[in-house]
Amino acid sequence: MQSRSPDGGFIRVCHHAAMTAPAGPPTGISAAERGAKSSGFAAEFKDAVTLRAFGLVLGVLLVQLAFVASYVGAFHSPTPHRIRVAVAAPQQVSGKIVAQLDGLDGAPLRALAAPDAAAARQWVLTRKTDAAFVFDATGTKDTLLVASAGGPSVSQTATQIAQKIEAAQKRQISVTDIRPPNAKDGRGMTPFYLVLGWVIGGYLTATIMGMAAGSRPASRPRTLIRLAALVPYAIVSGIAGAVIVGPVFDALSGHFWVLSGIGALIVLAAGTTALALQTLLGLLGTGVVILLFVVLGNPSSGGVYPAPLLPSFWSTIGQALPPGAGTTLVRNTVYFSGHATAPALWVLGSYAVGGAVLAWAASWWRERRQKVSEATEPAPDAGATTG
């Protein structure tokens, strides 16, 4: 016997109707709603892919390509050019030796006659020259003095050139490194990495202050506030960097407070310059900062290959930018008793002071433009009424 529910017939009818009904569009979504959804995506795409967005992406692409071109162009084929060398030789042959060194194919050396071996050694330690040839007047065993702390690549290149010269003249040469890097400084790269960190910290801090939530276009008071905020950051950054390379890793020990001051100056140079360019040019200013400090400044700084091994463009601009000036200042302070640091100090001081002045002037110029724009806007119609 089969039991049947009172409404079993009604359920079977509904099930049969559902199974045999023709397929149609999903319930609850009309053709108008589907069209609105499609047009909404198109509007969203049009709003996202604007001319401004395209321009920003294109700008990033150009900076990326410039980065690759700059680094590869600077480093792909290091070639010695006018490496400064002192020549200590008997007076009767000194001029001839200097002329021979200056006349080498490709002009790899720039020879300077030194009065004696002691003077030649002093020239290397005071950075007047990168190396020194000391010729043996009574025999055939000469000496090449180098200071690899000033750039191991230059010292190695000078050694290779000297060995070729001596082999051609059937003489022997011994190489003496009179100022090597500290034992924990590796290949003498710590000054470059330290300066790189300070430069990046300076311009990133300026950028973040401009992008912080609630920031408005920089007025003169706001610019002064940002400039003032850079000072304690620069001081803390300089001390922190000196702690890392000194007490922490013992790579550049013995110059803690001097390095702290140099670090503060480098951070201020990068920060105030970035603030000035961003105030003057807006978002484009950030791109210019990256171009100057990273794309051009880093490969030309002398950190990897010093100026005598770089192509002419990079060797020319290197010491005029904060990364190069900072690297030279740190190296010569730590390893060469502060000799040949005045040009680097002038460069960094000019960026720090010039950037602050330009930032204030740019904010003043923007304020004037804003006032002129407001004064020339048409006044609202007094008779107009709202509905």
Image: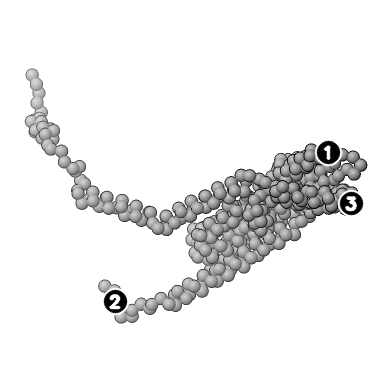
Query: Is 109 displayed left or right of 43 in the figure?
Result: right
Mark 2, residues whose alpha carbon is within 10 Å: few (<14), some, or many (≥20)? few
User: Alpha carbon of mark 1 to alpha carbon of mark 2: how far?
Assistant: 100 Å
Amino acid type of the residue that numbered disc 2 sits on in the rendered structure:
Thr
Does residue 124 appear in this view?
no
Q: Earlier in the sequence, mark 1 or mark 2?
A: 1
Q: Nearer the viewer, mark 1 or mark 2?
A: 1
Which residue appears at 49% of the width and 73% of the height? 369
Relative to 314, residue 277 above or below: below
The image shows residue 298 at horizontal and vertical percentages of 62, 51
Where does label 2 land, which residue? 385
Where does label 1 land, which residue? 171
Residue at far top of view:
1
The image shows residue 183 at horizontal and vertical percentages of 75, 40
Which residue appears at 15% of the width and 38% of the height? 23
Does residue 385 appear in this view?
yes
The image shows residue 38 at horizontal and vertical percentages of 27, 50
User: Alpha carbon of mark 1 to alpha carbon of mark 3: how far?
Assistant: 19 Å
Where does label 3 land, which residue? 91
User: Alpha carbon of mark 3 to alpha carbon of mark 2: how far?
Assistant: 99 Å
The image shows residue 150 at horizontal and vertical percentages of 74, 48
